[in-house]
Image: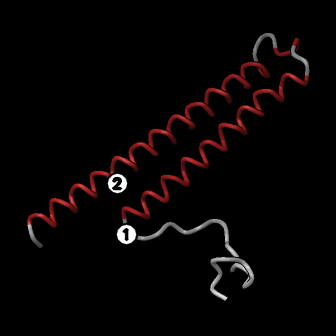
Amino acid sequence: METADLARENALLKARLAEVEATLAETQEANRRLQDILHAAQREKFGKRSEKLSPDQFNLPLEDAELAQGVLEAAQEKAEAALQRARGRRPASRHATAASPPHLPGSSG
């Protein structure tokens, strides 16, 4: 390999590493938020004042947890895609796409 080729490959790998690190940071932040929500829910349910809370108040942390779980899953998918790109493969699509009907523009039929 030429020196210029190695330099380009090095720059590409550094860029991909930065993507993976950014995605990892997002995932860790989402995980931290989930843990905070879980700890708050546990304090509300099992803490000294737990008897004074209405049942409706227990659902609020669960909604936050569901939202944070969605963020975590999206970050994990992004990390998996970045890792696949770093390995030189296209990420697997989670959604199957059907072929376009022949009468639509851009279809191969």
Q: Would you call the spot at circle 2 few (<14 residues within 10 Å), some (14-19), or many (20 or more)?
A: some
Label 2 vs 1, first from the N-terminus: 2
> Percent position (x, y) of residue 80?
49, 58
| Figure quadrant of the N terminus | bottom left
- Image quarter of residue 50: top right
Q: Looking at the image, is 52 positioned above or below residue 93?
A: above
> Percent position (x, y) of residue 52?
88, 11
**Which numbered dot is residue 71?**
none
Three-letter code for the amino acid on which mark 2 is drawn: Arg
Q: Would you call the spot at circle 1 few (<14 residues within 10 Å), some (14-19), or many (20 or more)?
A: few
Instruction: Identify the residue shown where x is 67% and y is 89%.
Output: 109
User: Is 82 left or right of 71, judged from the image as shown?
Assistant: left
Q: Looking at the image, is 63 positioned above or below residue 8?
A: above
Marks 2,1: beta carbons within 8 A: no
Three-letter code for the amino acid on which mark 1 is drawn: Gly
- Look at the image and name its color scheme: secondary structure
Q: Nearer the viewer, residue 43 or 58?
A: 58
Q: Residue placed farthest to the left in the image?
A: 3
User: Is 10 left or right of 42, judged from the image as shown?
Assistant: left
The residue to which callout 1 is attached is 88
The residue to which callout 2 is attached is 16
